[in-house]
Image (spheres, coloured by chain):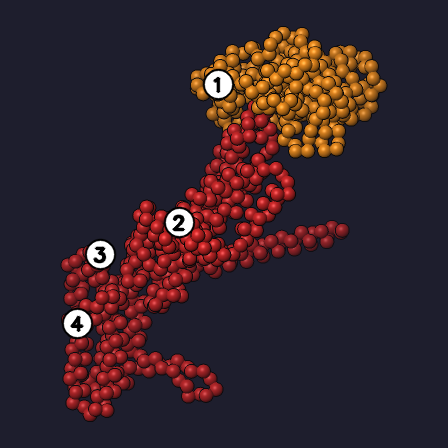
Chain colours: A orange, B red
């Protein structure tokens, strides 16, 4: 795929709310020109992220396949989270942070000035390391995104909230207390709620930044099962400390070390037969 | 460090803590107990028949027949006094000029003192001032006035090494050997029948306007004025303060200019309030002329300026204290800055912002200096809402000051002053209580 940049899909041509509401309600129809799991969804080319003078991610070139789960592993401070957060431009919050190189999403450069960041983030959702539901009701948490993007009809919202909570396998646990504060849920439930909330805006890519590191093993299993069910419908990038988790849930794995992308490949290959010395040392637990 | 030393340190620290907290509690009690004890005297006191007469004649309050009976009874005991004085006046006509002059002077003094206690002599023309139309309406004041009738206050300078000493001499001595000599004992004996003291509750103190420069009536104009001023200050300061706080935390670039701005705001919070008062006069009234002269509007604007730094700082800190993760969550869902602020940051920061607002409201209610030049007058009627744009108003803090220093008869209206203090302190306490409850409710709602 060529890297010609056209800001057509990510530009300001945001459809009006009615049209958008319709699109949000009919699931599985992304804005992308083509669907299917065999295209390249996200491509980076010599992509670097700087915090001031410190280069946290160094000239990373990689390709993320649509509909696949890609795990990013590496020791602490290797830049994997920074890289992930650069994809939906959450790093914009940090004043000293800037990038070099290209990151192309559906043929548009994410860092091109024409990009509407808000619209980009709607298409690239994110689940964070610590469950961070809003201090609102469970319903309002899931409905936050759809409301933001213009769905006002109560019936439509109810339907969508139920659909997303079911997708996140949380519906049965919370259906009787949708009006209770989300902070009353357990950690694992909160994380699934955050997932449901992210799904409610119908993103194409889901970024997960160590989504299970704050959870107990049972809740972790829940989330991992969820990732398996979401695969195919969504392109998923997951940053994890846990190599077993990466091996369990992902199709591809990328190994980062000190800001460099050392190796990337099919998960099975990478874990059984790593090319690079560093990778082998890391997955065999010699450092990290 | 040895274990015993550590223990000793911990213990002494705890002791210090208890000591300072105890000291604060004691100080609070020492301040509040007299405030309540004295202030309550404006509401619950022993009234005299004069008070009942005043209430009947001026406000049409009370049972007319009963009060008329009481007045009648009072008159029965007063009549002999006035008759004896009239007889004595007749007597001194026949004395030699020297004695006549002295007795006449003594008699004039006596009559003045008596009229302070009992009011004007029946049959004389009614004076204009209310305070001259009636005798003492409060029994505590009446006892003081009775003392002034019975005793003459003099200064004893006989010892050249000491300052003058106040001494009291029986007034009856002035009339020794005359028919008036017994009058004083009779008066002392009969004063309860004349004034008929009785405990009363004057809850209308809060809702009456004042009459004859606070000699009579209540403090409703002051309460209402305070309310208008605080409300006006809130109307101006809250939106400005919160918007400024949002700007400073979310929109402003965190550079030298912003930090300069921030420290300027902190400095502004420490500027003496009298400076704000003078600024309000110079700017709001003299320069841009929001009103011809003092007005509630000008006072509110000045108070708003005074509390703005507090509101900004409190809101800023509250917004800053909202976990970054909430903001990230909202942004990751595609919310813009504005939407994030409105739906996530402000609701989560609300308890902190509310606390700041109520604290500054307490300040606005109690501030005196900023309204001296911009809004406050010593007496006035309760204002209508639309009058606040052009009219000055009395207000509790300023009138407490006024009644205790500038009033023409400070000693005579202490009870009103104490009543005002009690009202103001209660108002501030209630506001703070409301803040605590509000904060607890909102944060409980947030925590789920």
Q: Earlier in the sequence, mark 2 or mark 3?
A: 3
Look at mark 2 in the image and give the residue it sits on.
Answer: B290
| Subunit under mark 1 | A
Look at mark 1 in the image and give the residue it sits on.
Answer: A17
Q: Earlier in the sequence, mark 2 or mark 4?
A: 4
Q: Is residue A86 left or right of residue B278?
A: right
Residue at the farthest front position = B287
- Element class at badge 3: helix
| Frontmost residue, A263 versus A162 | A263
| Subunit under mark 2 | B
Which numbered dot is residue B59? Answer: 3
On whether disc 2 and disc 4 are found on a single subunit, the reply is: yes
Residue B306 pos. (x, y %)? 48, 50
| Frontmost residue, B304 versus B318 | B304
What is the C-alpha distance between the residues marked 1 and 3?
Answer: 66 Å
Q: Is residue B48 left or right of residue B369?
A: left
Look at mark 4 in the image and give the residue it sits on.
Answer: B124
Residue B244 pos. (x, y %)? 52, 40
Answer whether labels 1 and 2 touch (C-beta < 8 Å).
Answer: no
- Element class at badge 2: loop
What is the C-alpha distance between the residues marked 1 and 2?
Answer: 45 Å
What is the C-alpha distance between the residues marked 3 and 4?
Answer: 23 Å
Residue B224 pos. (x, y %)? 35, 50
What is the C-alpha distance between the residues marked 4 and 1?
Answer: 86 Å
Q: Quadrant of residue B414?
A: bottom left
């Amino acid at each position: 795929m060529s890297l010609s940049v056209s800001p057509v899909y990510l530009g300001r041509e945001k459809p009006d709310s009615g049209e958008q509401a319709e699109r949000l309600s009919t699931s599985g129809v992304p804005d992308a020109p083509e669907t299917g799991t065999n295209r390249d969804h996200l491509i980076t080319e010599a992509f670097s992220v700087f915090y001031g003078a410190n280069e946290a991610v160094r000239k990373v070139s990689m390709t993320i396949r649509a509909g696949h789960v890609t795990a990013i592993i590496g020791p602490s401070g290797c830049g994997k989270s920074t890289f992930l957060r650069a994809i939906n431009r959450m790093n914009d919050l940090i004043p000293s942070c800037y990038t070099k190189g290209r990151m192309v999403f559906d043929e548009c450069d994410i860092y091109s000035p024409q990009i509407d960041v808000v619209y980009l983030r709607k298409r690239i959702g994110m689940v964070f390391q610590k469950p961070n539901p809003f201090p609102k009701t469970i319903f309002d948490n899931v409905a936050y995104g759809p409301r933001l993007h213009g769905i006002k009809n109560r019936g439509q919202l109810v339907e969508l909230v139920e659909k997303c909570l079911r997708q996140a396998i949380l519906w049965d646990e919370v259906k009787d207390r949708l009006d209770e504060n989300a902070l009353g849920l357990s950690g694992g439930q909160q994380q699934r709620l955050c997932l449901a909330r992210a799904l409610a805006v119908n993103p194409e890519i889901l970024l997960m930044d160590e989504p299970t590191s704050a959870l107990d093993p049972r809740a972790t299993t829940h989330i991992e099962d969820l990732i398996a069910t979401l695969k195919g419908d969504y392109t998923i990038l997951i940053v994890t400390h846990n190599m077993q988790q990466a091996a369990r849930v992902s199709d591809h794995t990328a190994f980062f070390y000190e800001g460099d992308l050392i190796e990337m490949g099919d998960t099975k290959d990478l874990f059984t037969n790593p090319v690079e010395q560093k990778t082998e040392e890391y997955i065999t637990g010699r450092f990290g | 460090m040895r274990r015993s030393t550590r223990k000793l340190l911990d213990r002494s620290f705890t002791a210090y803590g208890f000591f300072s907290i105890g000291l604060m509690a004691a100080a609070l009690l020492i301040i509040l107990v007299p405030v309540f004890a004295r202030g309550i005297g404006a509401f619950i006191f022993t009234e005299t028949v004069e008070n009942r007469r005043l209430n009947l004649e001026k406000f049409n309050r009370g049972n007319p027949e009963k009060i008329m009976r009481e007045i009648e009874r009072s008159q029965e005991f007063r009549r002999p006094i006035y008759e004896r004085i009239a007889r004595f006046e007749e007597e001194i006509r026949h004395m030699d000029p020297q004695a006549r002059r002295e007795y006449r002077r003594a008699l004039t003094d006596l009559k003045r003192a008596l009229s302070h206690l009992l009011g004007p002599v029946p049959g004389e023309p009614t004076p204009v001032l209310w305070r001259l139309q009636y005798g003492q309406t409060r029994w505590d004041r009446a006892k003081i006035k009775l003392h002034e009738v019975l005793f003459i206050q003099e200064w004893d300078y006989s010892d050249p090494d000491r300052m003058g000493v106040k001494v009291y001499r029986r007034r009856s001595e002035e009339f020794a050997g005359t028919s008036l000599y017994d009058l004083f004992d009779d008066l002392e004996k009969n004063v309860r029948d004349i004034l008929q003291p009785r405990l009363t509750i004057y809850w209308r103190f809060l809702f009456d306007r004042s009459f004859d420069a606070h000699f009579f009536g209540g403090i409703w104009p002051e309460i209402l004025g305070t309310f208008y001023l605080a409300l006006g200050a809130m109307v101006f300061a809250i939106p400005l303060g919160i918007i400024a706080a949002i700007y400073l935390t979310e929109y402003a670039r965190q550079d030298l200019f912003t930090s300069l701005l921030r420290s300027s705001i902190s400095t502004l919070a420490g500027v003496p309030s009298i400076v704000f008062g003078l600024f309000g006069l110079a700017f709001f009234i003299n320069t841009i002329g929001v009103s011809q002269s003092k007005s509630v509007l000008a006072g509110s604007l000045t108070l708003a300026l005074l509390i703005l730094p507090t509101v900004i700082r409190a809101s800023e800190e509250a917004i800053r204290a909202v976990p970054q993760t909430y903001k990230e969550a909202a942004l990751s869902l595609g919310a813009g800055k504005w939407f994030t602020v409105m739906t996530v940051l402000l609701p989560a920061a609300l308890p902190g912002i509310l606390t700041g607002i109520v604290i500054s409201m307490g300040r606005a209610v109690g501030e005196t200096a900023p309204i001296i030049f911009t809004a406050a007058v010593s007496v006035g009627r309760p204002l209508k809402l639309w009058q606040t744009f052009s009219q000055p108003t009395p207000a509790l803090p300023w009138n407490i000051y006024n009644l205790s220093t500038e009033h023409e008869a400070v000693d005579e209206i202490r009870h009103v002053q104490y009543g005002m203090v009690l009202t103001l302190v209660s108002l501030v306490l209630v506001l703070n209580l409301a803040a605590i409850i509000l904060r607890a409710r909102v944060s409980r709602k947030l925590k789920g």
